[in-house]
Image: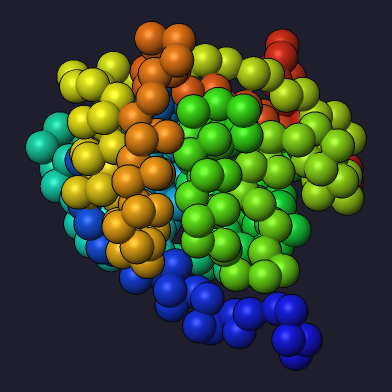
């Protein structure tokens, strides 16, 4: 293996530990309303088999299950899955949550009507492998949908800033490349004949100031915790001041993301945001 490429097993172990630390369920509460809207736009209905990849605490799996669909959620972090199970049980929803990897989905080929992922699979270290797996498990005529952070939105800027302070492993593509149309087309061109990308504003209303927002992420979001832990006092203050700024008065509330909806040939069409998998 090249020195420029990190050991995959070690990298995966680190990613799992990162998502298990902190309490991402606290963060996810503020993205849940947008997840409801994301699922609503997909037009999921009963008698549909749905897979939520990198499902976390169930933000998209749970509203999908409310439609009557048969929903499975898969994630690398067992503690997040346990939170998702509790949420589903509280609503008396029958959702199957299990541990798994977006790069090695434990499902048969062409077995699912809808494969979706929101702010999740974009963080897997091998995006080409992710694209292959999302396409592999989807049925001909099925739908693949992604929501991914853009680099110029608040979250993308936050990732870019922390990467300057604590560089990611070498050889790993930036997660926000999933918003770049040329890159997405290259990754999915082997599996699709049509792809549409739509940009939306995701509004998350945090009940505190930008400075308190930074403190909130430091308390609950493990990647942020790790970043501050590896910085000296002066650099910690700099990143706090940078992320706590609010130059337009709304930046800490508005996060941009791209949606990718994909359709493979052979089924009924959707009017927008779709791509078709080649046979």
Taking the image as shown, residue 192 lies to the left or right of residue 166, namely right
Task: Please indicate, yes or no, whether residue 265 appears anywhere in the rendered image.
Answer: no
Residue 96 point in image, percent of width and height: 32, 52
Report if residue 245 is visible in the image: yes
How many numbered discs sit on the rendered protein?
0
Where residue 196 appears, x then y in whole percent?
77, 24
Residue 213, x across and y down, in percent: 26, 31
* x 85%, y 29%: residue: 194
Instruction: Decide which of 239, 223 is in the foreground and name it.
Output: 239
Quadrant, the N terminus: bottom right
The image quadrant that residue 171 belongs to is bottom right
Residue 100 relative to residue 176: left or right: left
Query: What residue is at 38 percent from the left and 62 percent from the top?
Result: 231
> Which residue sits at x=42%, y=34%?
242
Residue ID at (45%, 10%): 248
Q: Is residue 142 above or below residue 171?
A: above
Give the image location of residue 172, x and y in percent.
67, 64
- Displayed quadrant of residue 39: top left
């Amino acid at each position: 293996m090249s020195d420029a490429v990190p050991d995959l097993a070690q990298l995966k172990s680190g990613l799992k530990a990162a998502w298990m630390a902190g309490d991402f369920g606290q963060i996810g509460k503020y993205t849940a309303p947008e997840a409801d809207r994301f699922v609503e736009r997909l037009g999921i209905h009963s008698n549909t088999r749905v897979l939520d990849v990198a499902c976390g605490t169930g933000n998209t799996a749970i509203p999908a299950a409310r439609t009557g669909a048969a929903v499975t959620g898969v994630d690398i972090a067992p503690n997040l899955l346990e939170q998702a199970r509790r949420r589903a049980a509280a609503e008396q929803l029958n959702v199957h949550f299990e541990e798994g990897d977006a790069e090695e989905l434990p499902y048969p080929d062409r077995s699912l009507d809808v494969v979706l992922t929101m702010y999740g699979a974009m963080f897997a270290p091998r995006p080409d492998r992710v694209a292959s797996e999302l396409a592999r498990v989807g049925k001909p005529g099925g739908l693949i949908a992604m929501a991914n952070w853009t680099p110029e939105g608040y979250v993308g800027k936050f990732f870019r800033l922390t990467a300057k302070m604590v560089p990611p492993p070498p050889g790993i593509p930036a997660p926000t490349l999933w918003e770049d149309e040329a890159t997405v087309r290259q990754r999915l061109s082997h599996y699709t004949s049509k792809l549409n990308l739509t940009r939306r504003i995701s509004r998350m209303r945090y009940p505190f100031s930008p400075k308190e927002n930074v403190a909130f992420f430091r308390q609950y979001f493990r990647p942020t915790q790790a970043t501050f832990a590896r910085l000296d006092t002066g650099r910690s203050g700099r990143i706090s001041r940078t992320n706590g700024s609010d130059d337009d008065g709304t930046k800490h509330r508005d996060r941009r993301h791209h949606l990718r909806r994909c359709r493979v040939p052979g089924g009924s069409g959707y009017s927008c945001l779709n791509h078709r998998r080649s046979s």
